[in-house]
Image: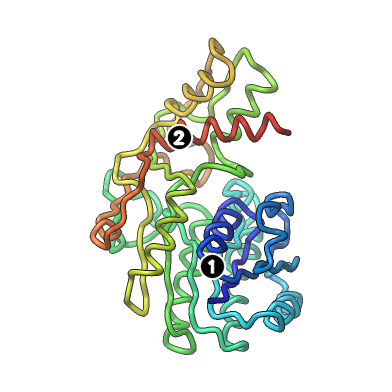
Amino acid sequence: MNILITGVAGFVGTNLAKAMLRRGGRISGIDNLRLGSTRNLDPVSTHPDFGFEIADLSDIEAYRRALGRLQSRNRIDEVWHLAASSDIPAGVADPAVDLRDTFMTTFNTLALMKEFGIGTIAFASSSAVYGDLGDRSLAEDSGPLFPISNYGAMKLASEAVISAGLESHLERAFIFRFPNVIGTPATHGVILDFVRKLKVNAAKLEVLGDGSQRKSYLHVDDLVDALLFIRAHAGDRLNYHNVGPSDEGVTVRFIAEQVVQRVAPGAGMTFGRGNQGWVGDVPAFSYATGKLSRLGWRPKLDSAQAVRRAVDEIVAQESRG
């Protein structure tokens, strides 16, 4: 099977490409390199079944040309659409960021899939589509959905146009609602932020918010395994799943403690006020993953284990420079 991964040079895209190539697929990738890096592609760049184009997916003409070049090498059977802005605060400061990089990349992907006759899409959505539902467990049928960040709003809008595409030209769709995904190559996130802060000042770690924020965390290896499992076993035309561990998650304070212990034992910690790290941050949520469990998949690591492993991996990454 020939697969296109958008956002292939990013954190999840890189790991997904490696896993798919190991399983014998032919992978084409497109990335604008705004957040991703060609360095992330070093493990796959010389593979004979990997092709790569640099293009801005929000520019449909540039996207069309890049997709045409990839199609001329290997006809693409399905698209795994991962390209998006992962910087939630940037989208709050400037809503055009998420309109351009999260929604328009999806809109253009669907338009070109229709044009090129590609019938299947797998889409990386987010827990951010749910908004802040307080203590309610977030299941796939929870609602109403009122995102509190532009990122979440554009992910939800993307889900909507994919659903509409099934009535027009799509044959199948897979929607994956991610939790907080951690591991390497890390480009953003709380663990990387803490590691870098301590490298600047090993005596004190400043934490945004009061540290009580509690969320589920999934290691990227488990995430990729889950995505490929869902693709192989889910049988509906529209498949949508929460992807994550079944535990209640861990707090930001716990993560800060793990990073301090690994990077600068004895460093002090200071906390802000309130339980939001930034505008648009959902301070706590409980992710229901029963639908995925019933399909037959469970993660190897719980949230705490995933955090400890990711801390080690990200510290090693930053030590390499």
Q: Nearer the viewer, mark 2 or mark 1?
A: 1
Where disc 2 sits, the SS reads helix
The residue under the point 70% across, 22% down is 200
Viewer-proximal residue among 89 and 186? 186
Amino acid found under the numbered disc labelled 1:
Gly
- The colour mode here is rainbow
The residue under the point 50% across, 47% down is 280
Amino acid found under the numbered disc labelled 2:
Val
| Image quarter of residue 175 | bottom left
Vertical position of residue 313 compared to residue 256: above or below: below
Pointers 2 and 1 in contact (CB under 8 A)?
no
| Image quarter of residue 266 | top right
Tell me if 77 is positioned left or right of 44 in this view.
left
Where disc 1 sits, the SS reads loop
Give the residue at mark 1.
24
Tell me if 262 is positioned left or right of 160 in this view.
right
Viewer-proximal residue among 190 and 233? 233
Label ID, residue 307: 2
Mark 2 vs 1, N-terminal side: 1
Vertical position of residue 73 compared to residue 20: above or below: below
Position of residue 319 measured from the top left corner of the image (x, y, whole percent): 68, 29
Vertical position of residue 249 compared to residue 167: above or below: above
Vertical position of residue 319 compared to residue 226: above or below: above
User: Would residue 52 be seen by someone viewing this image from the given angle?
Assistant: yes
Position of residue 30 measured from the top left corner of the image (x, y, whole percent): 68, 67
How far, Cα to Cα, is label 2 from label 1?
A: 30 Å
Viewer-proximal residue among 97 and 198? 198
User: Would residue 35 be seen by someone viewing this image from the given angle?
Assistant: no
| Image quarter of residue 240 | bottom left
